[in-house]
């Protein structure tokens, strides 16, 4: 069963910063498409964004209050996290601790491998106001 929910952007906790260039591209794409094609991925217990930081920030900057999120059990052994930047240690525990403390990594520091990730949900933006 897919656990996609529409949730308040304000409740979410990032663990990575966003990049201005990527953010600009995502905002352009959202305006052009008029819908959110893929949900963000969120730890259901701590509401930490695992994937989709740019989509969250883009929607917030465009005035939207909600987002479609796929809620996952981050403690599951099926979900893996890999480092993307040399010299920065990454683990699920480190991500949770930093996100809860409001301290974020640079953008694109981690990569989450999430099986059965939903695609093409096509959520209209008007439903996220």
Image: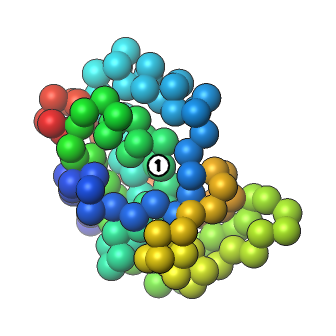
Q: How is the image coloured?
A: rainbow
Mark 1 surroundings within 10 Å by alpha-carbon count, few (fewer than 14), some (14 through 19), many (20 or more) = some
Q: Residue shown at 35%/34% (left/top)?
A: 61
| Residue 75 rendering spot, x and y as whole percentages | 47, 84
| Residue 9 rendering spot, x and y as whole percentages | 28, 52
Q: Is residue 118 left or right of residue 113?
A: left
Residue that sits furthest to the right in the current view: 86
Q: Residue shown at 85%/68% (left/top)?
A: 87
Q: Is residue 99 above or below residue 57?
A: below
Q: Is residue 53 left or right of residue 124?
A: right
Q: Is residue 79 visible?
A: no
Q: Tell which of 126 and 12 is nearer to you.
A: 12
Q: Is residue 123 visible?
A: yes
| Residue 44 rendering spot, x and y as whole percentages | 32, 73
Q: Is residue 116 above or below residue 80?
A: above
| Residue 7 rendering spot, x and y as whole percentages | 21, 56
Position of the N terminus by quadrant: bottom left
- Provide the secondary structure element on which disc 1 rests: loop
Q: Is residue 85 left or right of residue 24?
A: right
Residue bearing mark 1: 52
Q: Is residue 109 above or below residue 66?
A: below
Q: Residue shown at 57%/84% (left/top)?
A: 93
Q: Residue shown at 60%/80% (left/top)?
A: 94
**Among the 4 quarters of the image, the one containing residue 55:** top left
């Amino acid at each position: 069963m897919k656990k996609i929910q529409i949730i308040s952007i304000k409740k979410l906790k990032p663990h990575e910063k966003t990049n201005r260039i990527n953010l600009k591209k995502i905002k352009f794409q959202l305006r052009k498409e008029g819908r959110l094609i893929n949900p963000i991925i969120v730890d259901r217990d701590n509401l930490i964004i695992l994937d989709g930081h740019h989509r969250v920030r883009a929607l917030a900057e465009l005035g939207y209050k909600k987002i479609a999120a796929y809620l996952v059990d981050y403690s599951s052994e099926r979900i893996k996290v890999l480092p993307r930047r040399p010299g920065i240690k990454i683990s699920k525990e480190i991500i949770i601790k930093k996100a809860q403390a409001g301290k974020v990594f640079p953008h694109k520091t981690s990569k989450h491998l999430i099986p059965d990730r939903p695609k093409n949900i096509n959520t209209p933006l008007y439903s996220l106001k």
